[in-house]
Image: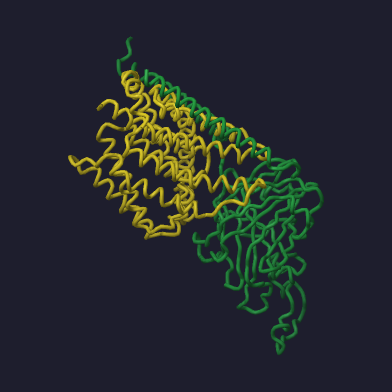
Amino acid sequence: MASFSGVRAQDHNLREWSLARVHLETLAVWLVIAVAFELVILRTLTRVAIHVPGLGAIAGPYEMLADAGRFAYYVATVLAVVVAAALAVAAWQVGTAGGRAMAAGIASLILAAALLRAGPGLGEAAALNTLLLAALVLVGIGAAGMVGARMAIAVVLATLTVALSGIFSVGQMWASEGTGHGLSAGFLDLAEWAAIAFAVSLPWTAGSVSSSSRRPAISGAVAATFVMVVLLGNPHTTRFLLLWTHGLTGSLPAIAYAVAAGCLVAVAVSLHQRGMALAACGLLLLVGGGVAMQNTYQSMLIGTGLACLALATSQRQARTR
Amino acid sequence: MKMPAMVRRRMPTLLVLALVLATAGILQLTNANPAASQSLMLISRAASSDPGLDPNAAVWNESASIDVPLTAQQQAYPIGGGSIATISAKSLHRDGNLYVRVEWTDATQDDSTLKVENFSDAVALEFPASASATVPSICMGQVGAGVNIWQWRADSQVGHGDPSERYPNLWVERYPGDGPEFYTARAAGNPYALADGGPVQDLVAASFGNIGPAGSQTVQGQGVYQAGKWAVVFARPLNPGDASLTAFHETGTTDLAFAVWDGSLSERNGQKSVSAFVRIHIFPGDAGGSATPAWLIALGLLVGLSGLGVGLAVIGTRSGAK
């Protein structure tokens, strides 16, 4: 593990990091708030609102809410780049091999996203998306190198999820530009399994859910029940939304998604209680980013999520060593 | 007056947040999206010769196809479909016209609806209308973000036919006249009822339940059934000059979704296999040149990135070991 060879560097940078962490945590928390608002209002509510009968009667308030959701999207998009850049600097300052690799990955991610936004010409879209995928994988590899063995399993599972779904997307892009014939949709099924495995492994990989407080367990149970109810109550619309917002096909039994959501929320609450707000933000940003390469904003959320998780847990290790 | 210590400590963060909020406000006001879509893209190249309406025209070999996954329509009643797993799409443009060719597997050729229990094979393309302020709902659009739909029907291509072909003993009382009062659907402008309407209907909608014919019917199309597959070509001028329809440009990107009906499974109306939105990018150049440069770009980027990552990792390891 990179963290063993870089212990001295980590200790040297610990004081500087603790000062920077305050700013980084604040920005990450605001990013999570903006992403959550955008996810609920823009990605969910406005997509199902057409099914609400008599929506015209409340068109004014609805328009205001939709505009607020769009504003949250713009805030999240800009803030994601700012947080990503700050994370890259922090990762670089850690000084370990994993930290440097992660910093390079984040820098490449920002570069690829910027080039894609600039509007690629023919033959460049697939190449740039390949670069973006490679950057995400590099962030994941760097992150895995920064954290302990257990947490590395979670990070690898998260990275594997992105890689599998990304390889399918990129393969399709190359095929559309005349190279190859695309890849089997089986990659998406594997990505789905990896995503569930990541979430379910968290109580073990991210440290046990605190036994001194019942809040994590209760929060997890509420989240699991909610997901179960909406998946069983309105499976068609929920699975459609799951696909649109997170890139999950919803092909597995509802119980799998319910347990995964429960584990994620319980661990996020537990991390927050243990003073690891940055790690909790990382988990929530991964949820906001989803599993598929849908747009550069969501890809940026995945990258920042992995980096938050790695930086928070690696510094915790260094402090406790 | 001195600033409280906590505010002073948090000042850099607060300044960054203020800057982010201001930037987001400007982006929203100018409708400038800082993110780029990474969804599947259908590239429409300039064709070397007129593709016409023949799905088997050799010029279609100049276009690379994409396979778009389909699923059952489960959003609005009547729900159903899902029998067609994927649809393959290609696109070309030439002389101010856009051509889209779609192909899908269907074991039966259902092109007659002379019996009431018969339903036709069909395919439709859905684009955001030019006037749409945002990407519309995939379910036939929404208020303020309408959609333009091109629907090809196998039965319309074959023609209405005469019911006596299927029912030889059919007897019809003679109509007292042939005025519009006796052909109400034609009088109402229903393109399906028009004998010379062609196999493609140009439709507009701004939510499910209110689809109707466009003011002008400028989309042409032709389908061919062979070896268990339908292949259909749509053609339309890039710019129809109507805000309720979709305008394309010589270079630019818009969204595109697909729907397929299998008549032998009684699929009609909302019972259809549908896709999510993909993007269609109209590229001014032709298909000249191979994909090798793109591979080289990707390879170069990958090697460069990996080298950078490994290099930085080595530096990190050394500085950590000191």
Quadrant of the image occupied by residue B196: bottom right
What colour is chain B?
A: green
Q: In the picture, which quadrant includes the C terminus of chain A?
A: top left
Q: Nearer the viewer, residue A153 or B317?
A: B317
Residue B175 at what x, y percent from top left?
74, 82
Is residue B186 something one can see in this rendering?
A: no
Residue B296 at what x, y percent from top left?
64, 36
How many numbered marks appear? 0
Identify which residue is drawn at 55% across, 66% down. B83
Q: Is residue A13 above or below residue A164?
A: above
Identify which residue is drawn at 42% across, 36% down. A34
Identify which residue is drawn at 42% across, 32% down. A142
Q: Nearer the viewer, residue A269 or B129?
A: A269
Question: Residue placed farthest to the bottom in the image?
Answer: B169
Q: Nearer the viewer, residue B260 or B107?
A: B107
In the image, taking residue B63 as reference, residue A127 lies left or right, namely left
Residue B51 at what x, y percent from top left?
78, 54
Coloring basis for residues: by chain
Q: Is residue A219 above or below residue A92?
A: below
What colour is chain A?
A: yellow
Q: Is residue B141 above or below residue A288?
A: below
Identify which residue is drawn at 75% across, 65% down. B197
Is residue A130 something one can see in this rendering?
A: yes
Q: In the picture, which quadrant includes the N terminus of chain A?
A: top left
Q: Nearer the viewer, residue B320 or B163?
A: B320
Question: Residue placed farthest to the top in the image?
Answer: B1
Residue A63 at what x, y percent from top left?
49, 43
